[in-house]
Amino acid sequence: MSQTDIGTELRQAAPEPLLPVEKKLIGFSLGTGLVLLVALALLNYFMPATF
Amino acid sequence: MSAIETAPARISWTASETAPSISEDWLSVIIGLFIFVLALAALANIDLIGWAVTTSVWSNLGEALGTASKSYAPLGGVGALLATYAALLGVLSAAAVALKADVQKFALAFTAVFAIAYASWVVGRDANFAAVTPAELQKFGISWSLRLTNEGGFVFALIAGLIVANVFPRFAETIKEAVRPELYIKIAIVILGGFFAVTAAGKLNLATSLLLRGVAAIIEAYLIYWAVVYFVARKWFGFNREWAAPLASGISICGVSAAIATGGAIRARPIVPVLVSSLVVVFAVIEVLILPFLAQTFLWREPLVAGAWIGLAVKTDGAAVAGGGITESLILAKSAAEGVKYQPGWILGTTATVKVFIDVFIGIWAFVLGYIWTNHINATSDKAKISEIWQRFPKFILGFVLTFLIGLYLALATPADVAAKVPAAIGEANTFRVIFFILTFFSIGVLSNFKKLWQEGIGKLAAVYVISLFGFVIWVGLLISWLFFAGVKPPLAG
């Protein structure tokens, strides 16, 4: 496919609904990420950087 | 990065190569370590690379150039420049041979790249651009300055590259053999490991704290950014999976390498990660032109927040680490003008740490995506293999860690008379780190042909990028940087 066809391809691409596995990936990533960030923030609070 | 070598397609600058026997990634480790080891000979009182050219802030062009070491002063500035050019040409031509590139074309192209990039650097060090403090203005006998600091020359090199790409595209095509930002920045990062070690040795507790905080960057990039950008691309913009996954990786993780690693992992067509990578480079340029100055204006009281923010917000190693260098220079200048003199190296070190931490997990993330795609989305016999984690691991990080550990050992565990020589020795290697930064900035500019990119019809991809980057990535990056780095200040100089 030539590069100039890319714009057309992107405009005309058939919709692909989110699959359950994609929803799981997004949800699991966000959930785990937020939990870990909160845990790290607490760790950071109770163990501040030492100089 | 290893991701590039294993990808189904290469970025345009490597188009003439066929099946290189070694990757750019490993070459960067070899070249970076080679320079580092040569520099360490100074510990045995053998100065092997003191002839490297350095550029001072100048008001008289004749005094701009000099040698890294006084022992080579008789060589003169122009002699040092020629020696540095010849040495780099030799080493990088050997690298071109290993990459099976056209060496003659590479040599000619590199000559042009080095000449324009270094000339831009010298122009950027004109006192009217670089001088910052009233004392400096007085010293150079000038009444005004743009106050772009010592590192403003990087911006000049970037602008020179942008001019070449957008005004002289045929010339840009001619020199593309030597336009290799990934190779240049990886060599610089390997050398940076030793420089960061010397900086960290003075404040080991603080350095350890920074490393621990780097973990937050990994979580943010892979688990928060990726999920949100993928959702935005799929749900709001209607991209299919083949485009959305590399795009999410490009915007969220580590730009070019992540997009290419993801493209390979989900078995996307080669054109997909290549176009996403082009977009990443263009936006990285825009960020480098804007974010360091915003950081200087709004974050100069929190230097390490600024350093971490640049590492999280700017995609591609080259632009991020180089942007960290500009940010450091701008903030140190602003702080000095306010009477606070921080030790150099910490802001750049924070940016590099954040970036390296993020890079480490590219292979694992690509494997996770590959596993999901080849088992649950596009079930295929070509399943993701565990060996792909190592294949996609960015090997230059090994070089960074090695020079860091060696530097730390030499600074902390050797007799005092040896340890005292370490900063000067690694300082000479750092001269080359700066030169590779300059080459990186220019190369990134040359790869940023805005008109060509627009003609390729990727406005919709750019829209996702703009919304994700400026509406989410930058601000969440700032929040996380603030959360983990606020109040952590670099040591004071002297």
Image (cartoon, rainbow, N blue to C red):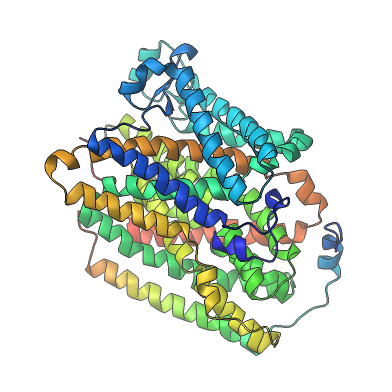
Q: Report the front residue among B333 and B180.
A: B180
Q: Residue at x 74, y 75 (%)?
A: B240
Q: Please state, as top left, top right, bottom left or bottom right, where the C terminus of chain B lies in the image.
A: top left
Location of residue B64 with respect to A33 vertically, above or below: above
Residue B212 on image: x %, y % = 31, 64
Location of residue B219 with respect to B156 vertically, above or below: below
Q: Is residue B224 visible?
A: no
- Give the residue at the far left of this rendering: B416
Q: Please state, as top left, top right, bottom left or bottom right, where the N terminus of chain B lies in the image.
A: bottom right
Q: Is residue B469 visible?
A: yes
Q: Residue at x 65, y 59 (%)?
A: B465
Task: Examine the image and state in which quarter residue A35 appears.
Answer: bottom left
Q: How many marks?
A: 0
Task: Examine the image and state in which quarter residue B241 appears.
Answer: bottom right
Task: Give the left or right position of residue B205, taking residue B263 as reference.
Answer: left
Location of residue B216 with respect to B344 vertically, above or below: below
Task: Give the left or right position of residue B50, taking residue B94 as reference.
Answer: left
Residue B126 on image: x %, y % = 49, 20
Residue B214 on image: x %, y % = 37, 62
Q: Residue at x 49, y 18 (%)?
A: B78
Q: Report the front residue among B104 and B198.
A: B104
Q: Residue at x 70, y 34 (%)?
A: B164
Q: Report the front residue among B115 and B305.
A: B115
Residue B268 on image: x %, y % = 71, 72
